[in-house]
Image (spheres, rainbow, N blue to C red):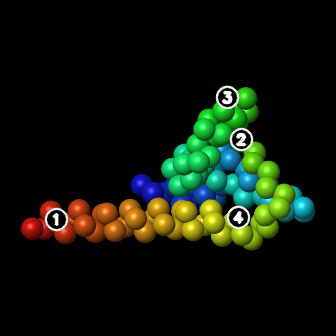
Amino acid sequence: MFSSISEFLEKELFTDVKVCCGLDIKFVRCHALILMAAIPSIKEILIEVSKVEEEVLTIILPEDSFESINAIISDIYLALKQEVSLTTNVLYTNKSL
């Protein structure tokens, strides 16, 4: 399931957050649910903004580089994918017992 979410990110499918970075305003797209799960401190902010914004939430981080924000978001999705892979392996191993 979560590998599909990573694929959705790669193809920018169902992404509902746009994080604008740096002075040149490059942006990274991602999923609000994944962002809120990984960074609980922004959960309330995203919930409030989602009441006003209709489709895509925009976060502007002018002092952060595109490269650093892109790396952070990539790491979140990679960790999610690895966690699910580990959980799946554990479940499979336990069923074998």
Q: Image quadrant of residue 64?
A: bottom right
Q: Residue furthest front?
A: 41
Q: CA distance from mark 1 to mark 2?
A: 41 Å
Mark 2: secondary structure:
loop
Pointers 4 and 1 in contact (C-beta within 8 Å): no
Mark 4 or mark 1: whose residue is earlier in sequence: 4
Mark 3 or mark 4: whose residue is earlier in sequence: 3
> Could you classify mark 1 by the number of other residues whose Cα lies within 10 Å: few (under 14), some (14-19), or many (20 or more)?
few
> Could you classify mark 4 by the number of other residues whose Cα lies within 10 Å: few (under 14), some (14-19), or many (20 or more)?
some
Q: Which mark is residue 69?
A: 4
Mark 3: secondary structure:
helix
Mark 1 or mark 3: whose residue is earlier in sequence: 3
> Could you classify mark 3 by the number of other residues whose Cα lies within 10 Å: few (under 14), some (14-19), or many (20 or more)?
few
The one of 46 and 14 positioned closer to us in this rendering: 46
Q: CA distance from mark 1 to mark 3?
A: 43 Å
Point 62% across, 62% down: residue: 73
Mark 3 or mark 2: whose residue is earlier in sequence: 3
Residue 4: x and y in percent read 49, 57
Mark 1 or mark 2: whose residue is earlier in sequence: 2
> Could you classify mark 2 by the number of other residues whose Cα lies within 10 Å: few (under 14), some (14-19), or many (20 or more)?
some
Q: CA distance from mark 4 to mark 2?
A: 18 Å
Q: Image quadrant of residue 70?
A: bottom right
Q: Residue furthest top?
A: 51
Which residue is labeled 3 in the image?
51
Which residue is labeled 2 in the image?
56
Which residue is labeled 1 in the image?
94
Mark 4: secondary structure:
helix
Residue 46: x and y in percent read 64, 40
| Amino acid type shown at disc 2 | Val
Q: CA distance from mark 3 to mark 4?
A: 24 Å
Mark 1: secondary structure:
helix
Q: Classify the position of the C terminus by image quarter.
A: bottom left
